[in-house]
Image: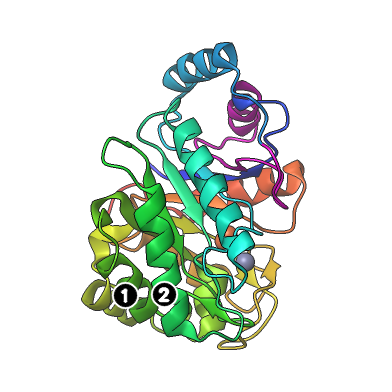
Amino acid sequence: MLTIGCHLSSSKGYLNMAKTAVSINANTFQFFTRNPRGGAAKPIDEADIQAFLEYSKENGIKTILAHAPYTLNACAADPSIREFAKNTMADDLRRMEYTPGQLYNFHPGSHVKQGAEVGIQLICEHLNQVLYPEMTTTVLLETMSGKGSEVGRSFEEIRDIIDRTELSDKLGVCLDTCHVYDAGYDIVEDIDGVLDEFDRIIGIDRLKAVHINDSKNPYASHKDRHEKIGEGFIGTDAFERILNHNYLRNLPFYLETPNELDGYEREIAILRGLYKQEM
Ligand code: FE
Ligand code: FE
Ligand code: ZN
């Protein structure tokens, strides 16, 4: 069965997100752990979590994906920004244990003129400080488009981060279709080749989730502007191949397209229609 959902607002709590997901025929969802621009998270409401866990069990929601604030930059040149990144992710990972065994995604960061090599070094130092042996969450590195000085623009950079992190068994990858296409991986003309390359360089077992977004910009543009499914340069035919690919079809898919809830509901219906139940 296809596992698909979209990004939802977390302002009304976990149970509300799960009910919203079910109301649009989703069976998973993504949410920001706190205000996307950072700041303190709301205190955990244990009654809400309990109600969420029960509701999810009854309604077939197994996987959820928390997204770190996008201002979190583990490889900033400014030490106070790195300190904020460390404290924020450490706090998020403690909070994630209220919903054990789930996924937490973050953008590796922007090296801001320090170079990718220094950036990767700082990201690994960050991960070595925030990952801990008892955690049940899998932390996902998101594949980035390579705009500005983003780290994670290539499978090699992602692999280097994983290789140089001590608790690398806690790490996985989230493939963002808009980002990799903009980064220069041709998932439209050669999805098999791209995923074989992913397998060769990172290992396909590391792939734990897909951000399914069309792109407003052409191949290798290094831009990162998401478009509605079928209205961008990736297009519906490519998404049909992506959804059904053997390496991807059992992963959870998350829409981060420019939509309100009704638009997400429509896209989920379209993608469910493209999914082949048996292969
Ligand atoms: Fe992201
Ligand atoms: Fe994304
Ligand atoms: Zn993006």
Discs 2, 1 touching: Cβ within 8 Å: yes
Badge number at residue 217: none
Q: Quadrant of ligand 3?
A: bottom right
User: Can see residue 63?
Assistant: yes
For the residue pair 198 and 249, the one nearer the viewer reads as 198
Q: Nearer the viewer, mark 2 or mark 1?
A: 2
> Label 1, on which residue?
160
Some atom of ligand 1 lies within 8 Å of the CB belonging to the residue at label 2: no
Residue 239 sits inside the magenta stretch: no
Residue at horizontal 54 percent and vertical 60 percent from the top:
212
> Please, what is the three-letter code of the amino acid marked with disc 2?
Ile
Packing grade of label 1 (10 A; few <14, some 14-19, many >=20) is some
> Label 2, on which residue?
120
Say which quarter of the image contains residue 196.
bottom left
The quadrant in which the N terminus is found is top left
For the residue pair 118 and 2, the one nearer the viewer reads as 118
